[in-house]
Image (cartoon, helix red, strand yellow):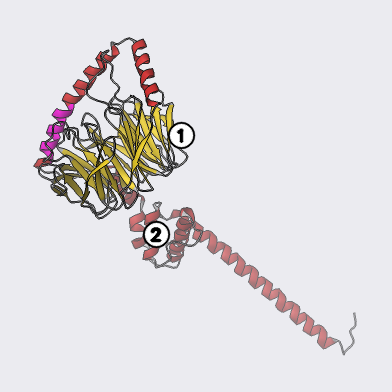
């Protein structure tokens, strides 16, 4: 084909441009192929690298690489993939990455796991050893006595049990408001009846504890020894029934981390237990009266000798603050509940965990052992109360108790005396308090609701007197409230 001479230069320019474009395309294809090969090589190398599986180790390795430990919206899997890619890139570039893999090798992780699973013991002195021996002897005698009582109860005809329980339920349904008492500067966080059912102690978030007489709630004095937030109140088992008024009768805990010991004859503390590094919440006297257990925001619970006022045991085991604490009625076990939503049952004689109470989805704020010796109830911010069987090591019932967090729970402990027919009212009822402004009484046989007591404000604490005549509670609006049943 002939071309006009005037068009020949333009045709040559077009051929040149087409040739250059073709060359660029070849170069782009070559570059793209190279990137694909490099990507496959990085993936191959990355898959062979022993990248840590523990997220904390992944973050630590990223920090060593001077890389951000996390990106917005990045989860654990994304973070681990990013670390794998970074290490693979350095390895392909010829950089030694052994120092970054040392803590993440399978062998290292396996050894770390073995260390985590190993039992470890907190060193204890001769005082703790002596205390454990005492608790062992004491609890064996108490459990023997409890089992003998249960054997006697088993000999009573079933119809007598049914009649007796029906009578108790009907009496519980008659509880009505008797009166309230002000005099507090902040919400009333703890209330406890004395063993003889003639006094009630109430503490508030301002750090003061008021003593009042029953049934009129007449003030008997204020004990001010804490900086704020009374976390727990506990009476000596023999207080007001055998213990001298000048001796230790009462213990309280506060936000400053101290436990104050009080007599009834003075408004000055007779002793102070110091050792916790943060706020002390629930406390409880051991049934023998020789020890006090305390739960704290320092992630521990501790055992104290009230005679020497020395710390015997510092027990870890919770991943968050410990709020609830209670001793078993025999004195052999202790229960702790934390803001990690777990509760644990501890054997005081061997320092071992007997049972882990795993079931709540929110914080545990209170717990109590049943007088029957084998049941324990836990109250949680998930609005429920769970009942656990220590023998079966599992939850046997979940009470959908309230519509807001359950702030307190307690079993009715009863008097030491039995009825004429040989029956006892110990452990027949369970009580719960909640931020939904109610107190509820539950039948401990089938966990059915007996009665609901309506309150005008959130309820922080609840207790029932040993003679079953009164129910006391501490309210958010700075009032102590007293309910009574028909005689």
In what element is the residue under mark 1? loop
Q: Position of residue 89 (x, y in %)?
A: 46, 65
3D distance between C-alphas at marks 2 and 1? 40 Å
Instruction: Report if residue 113 is visible in the image.
Output: no
Residue found 32% across the figure and 9% down from its top: 157
Which residue is labeled 2 in the image?
Answer: 59
**Does residue 471 show up?**
yes
Q: Residues within 10 Å of mark 1 (few under 14, many from 20)?
A: few
Q: Point out residue 33 in the picture as x, y percentages from the top left corner.
A: 60, 65
Q: Which residue is mark 1?
A: 400
What segment carries the magenta color?
A: 128-139
Q: Secondary structure at mark 2?
A: helix
User: For the stretch drawn in magenta, what is the main secondary structure?
Assistant: helix
281 lies left or right of 309: right
Around disc 2, counting alpha carbons within 10 Å, would you say few (fewer than 14), some (14 to 19), or many (20 or more)? many
Q: Position of residue 175 (x, y in %)?
A: 38, 29
Number of numbered markers = 2
Which residue is depicted at the point 17% across and 51% down?
Answer: 274
- Residue 482 at what x, y percent from top left? 34, 37
Q: Is residue 313 left or right of residue 166?
A: left
């Amino acid at each position: 084909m002939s071309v006009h001479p005037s068009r020949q230069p333009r045709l040559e320019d077009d051929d040149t441009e087409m040739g250059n474009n073709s060359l660029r395309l070849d170069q782009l294809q070559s570059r793209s192929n190279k990137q694909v090969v490099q990507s496959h090589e990085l993936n191959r190398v990355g898959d062979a690298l022993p990248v840590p599986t523990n997220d904390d180790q992944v973050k630590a390795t990223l920090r060593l690489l001077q890389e951000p430990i996390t990106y917005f919206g990045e989860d654990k899997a994304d973070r681990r993939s990013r670390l794998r890619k970074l290490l693979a890139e350095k390895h392909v570039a010829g950089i030694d990455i052994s120092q970054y893999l040392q803590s993440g090798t399978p062998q290292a992780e396996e050894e770390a796991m073995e260390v985590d699973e190993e039992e470890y013991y907190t060193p204890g002195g001769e005082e703790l050893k002596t205390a454990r021996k005492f608790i062992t002897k004491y609890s064996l005698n108490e459990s023997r006595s409890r089992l003998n009582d249960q054997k006697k109860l088993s000999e009573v005809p079933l119809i007598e049990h049914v009649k007796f329980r029906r009578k108790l339920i009907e009496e519980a349904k008659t509880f009505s408001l008797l009166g309230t008492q002000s005099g507090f500067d902040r919400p009333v966080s703890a209330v406890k009846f004395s063993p003889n059912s003639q006094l009630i102690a109430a503490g508030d978030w301002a750090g003061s504890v008021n003593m009042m007489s029953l049934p009129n709630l007449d003030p008997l004095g204020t004990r001010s020894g804490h900086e704020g937030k009374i976390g727990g109140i506990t009476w000596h088992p023999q207080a007001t029934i055998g213990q001298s008024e000048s001796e230790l009768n009462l213990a309280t805990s506060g936000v400053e981390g101290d436990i104050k010991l009080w007599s009834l004859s003075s408004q000055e503390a007779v002793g102070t237990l110091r050792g916790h590094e943060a706020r002390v919440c629930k406390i409880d006297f051991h049934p023998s009266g020789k020890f006090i257990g305390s739960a704290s925001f320092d992630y521990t619970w501790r055992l104290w000798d009230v005679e020497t006022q020395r710390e015997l045991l510092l027990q870890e085991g919770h991943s968050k603050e410990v709020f609830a604490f209670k001793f078993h009625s025999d004195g052999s076990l202790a229960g702790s509940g934390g803001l990690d939503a777990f509760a644990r049952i501890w054997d005081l004689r061997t320092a071992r965990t007997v049972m882990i109470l795993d079931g709540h989805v929110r914080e545990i704020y209170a717990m109590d052992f049943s007088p029957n010796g084998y049941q324990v109830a836990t109250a949680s911010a998930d609005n429920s109360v769970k009942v656990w069987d220590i023998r079966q090591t599992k939850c046997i019932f979940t009470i959908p108790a309230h519509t807001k967090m359950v702030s307190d729970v307690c079993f009715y402990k009863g008097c030491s005396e039995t009825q004429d027919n040989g029956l006892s009212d110990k452990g027949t009822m369970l009580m719960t308090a909640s931020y939904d402004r109610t107190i509820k009484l539950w039948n401990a046989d089938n966990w059915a609701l007996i009665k609901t007591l309506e309150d005008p404000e959130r309820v922080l604490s609840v207790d029932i007197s040993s003679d079953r005549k009164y129910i006391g509670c501490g309210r958010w609006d700075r009032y102590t409230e007293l309910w009574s049943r028909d005689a």
